[in-house]
Image (tube, rainbow, N blue to C red):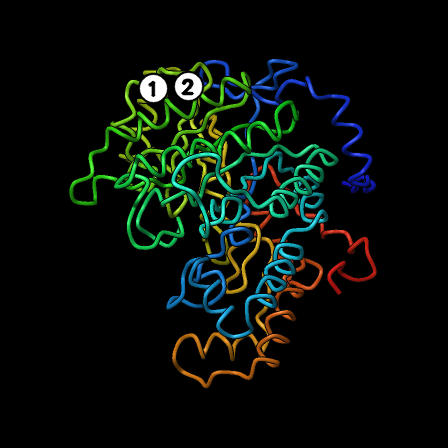
Amino acid sequence: MIHFRPIVTFTLFVALTQSNASAFAKYTTKGQNIVERKTGEPVILRGFGIGGWLLPEGYMWGIRKLDRPRQFEAAIEELIGKEDAAEFWRLYYENFLIEDDIAAMKAWGSNTVRIPLLASMLQPRAGQPDAPPYVYNEAHFKILDRLVGWCEVHDMGVIWDMHGAPGGQNAENISDSDGEARLWTEKDKYWPQCIDLWMKIVRRYAGREIIVGYDLLNEPLLRRYDGIDTAPLRELYIKLTREIRTVDKNGIIFVEGDDWAQNFEMLEPLDWDPHLVIAFHCYPPTASMDEKMTGWEKLRQKYNIPLWHGETGEVRPPYDHNRKSTAFLEANNIGWSWWTHKKLSRKTQPWYCARTSGFDKILEYWKGNGEKPARADAKRWLFEQARRTRSDKCEFLPEMVNSLKGLEAERPAKAKRDKAPSE
C-alpha cells in the first residue's frame, strides 16, 4: 500500500532548498531517452497537466460563450466589482490545486506535473510598458512558489508550460488571445515580453532539482493565419533557449510544432540544443503507429532526441482508449502528460467538481438564458464555487487513474486541514 508523506511546512522547504541551490535538475536527456541525471537510468515521464487552474477554459467550467480568462475576468468584475472579483480569483487559485493533489498524484505513480502559465496573471496587461523593465505581479508569483514547495516536498517534477504567452501564440481561447496571434503579428512588442517573462521564471527557480524543464510555447499556430510565416517559430525557440541556458544549463527544452503541436517541419534542423524533446499533442490519445506518429518517430530517429506526448486525454468512461494509448506509448519509450487533473464539467480526469446551483445560474446569465443575479447573490455563489473546487469537495474517479499505465489509484488522503484556509 502506498502511503502519503507527512506535510513539510513551506518555511522548512525554503530553508532546505536555499541550502541546495546548486542542485542539478532531476532529469535530463541522453539520446532518445529521458534519464535520471544522478543514475543515467531511462525514465518514462508520467503526469498530469494542471489545466483550468491558472488559465481556465470555458468548456472546463461548463460554458462556451465565454471561453478564456480575459472574458471570465471581465464578466466576474461586471457582476461583483473589481475588489470582490480579485478575492474570487484568490479563492479559486488557492482551492483548485492544493498540496494533497500533488501528494495524491505522486502516490498513484506520477512523476511530473505540467503547469500551464498565463502571461497576464504574472505580467499584467494593464499598465505594461512597451519595453523593459516590465511590470510583474509578485503576489501571483507566490502561488508558483507554493506549488514548487509542494513538489519539492513530494518529489514531483515540474514542467513549466507557456500556455498563454504575451500577445498570444495563437488567436484562440487556449492562449487567452484577444482574437489575434500578436506574438507573431507584433513581434517587436511581444517577443521581448515573452523572453523577459521566461527569464523571470527561470531565474526565480534556478537550481531547484524538481524543475524538469520548459515547454516553450503551447500549441503555437502560424500558417493558418494569412500573412504569417512559420520560420519565426524556430527563431523564437532558439532565442528563448539561448537565454534560458545563461541560467539553467540542465533543464529540458520541450518544443511544440505548428498546427496544435503536430507539425514540426519548420523547426528543422532540431539541433540547436543538446537537451531538446519533441513535445507533440494529439486528441484522442495516440495509440498506434499511424501516419502522424510515424512522422514524429522519424524525427526522433533523425535527430536522436526523445518524444513526449505532452498533452492528451479527454477520454470519457469507460476509459478504454486511455489503456490502449498509455500501453502503446510506454512500449515505445514515450512519456505522457494527461489533460487534466480536474474540471467542473466532465468526467475525463481524476477529479470531477460538481457545479453548484448558484454557479449554474451565473452560467445561464452569461449564456443569455437567465436574469442577471443580484450582486450579493453572485458574490456568494462565485465564492462558494471557488471553495468547492478543492479536491476533498469533489468526486474522485479512481477508474480513470487506473486506466493510465503505470498509475494505480489510491483514494486520496483526507484533507490535512479541518477546513479550507480560505474559509
Residue 394 percent location from the top left of the image: 65, 63
How many residues crowd mark 2 within 10 Å: few (<14), some (14–19), many (20+)?
many
- Whether residues under marks 1 and 2 lie with C-beta atoms below 8 angstroms apart, the answer is yes
In front here: 157 or 141?
A: 141
Above-or-below relation of 228 to 396: above
Q: Quadrant of the C terminus?
A: bottom right
Residue 381 percent location from the top left of the image: 61, 75
In front of the other: label 1 or label 2? 1
How many residues crowd mark 1 within 10 Å: few (<14), some (14–19), many (20+)?
many
Residue 270: assigned label: 1
Disc 2 marks a residue whose amino acid type is Ile
Residue at x-position 50% and y-position 31%: 335
User: Which residue of the protein is positioned furthest toward the left in this rendering?
Assistant: 227
Measured in 3D between alpha carbons, the distance from the residue under mark 1 to the one under mark 2, in whole angstroms, is: 9 Å
**Circle 2 sits on which residue?**
305
Q: Quadrant of residue 138?
A: top right
Could you tell whether 279 is left or right of 199 in the image?
A: left
Q: Quadrant of residue 352?
A: bottom right
Q: Quadrant of residue 159?
A: top right
Disc 1 marks a residue whose amino acid type is Leu
Residue 161: assigned label: none
Residue 179 percent location from the top left of the image: 30, 54
Could you tell whether 97 is left or right of 10 in the image?
A: left
Q: Quadrant of the N terminus?
A: top right
**What secondary structure is found at the residue carrying circle 2?**
loop
Q: Earlier in the sequence, mark 1 or mark 2?
A: 1
**What secondary structure is found at the residue carrying circle 1?**
loop
Residue at x-position 64% and y-position 51%: 97
Residue at x-position 62% and y-position 41%: 407
Above-or-below relation of 31 to 94: above
Above-or-below relation of 327 to 118: above
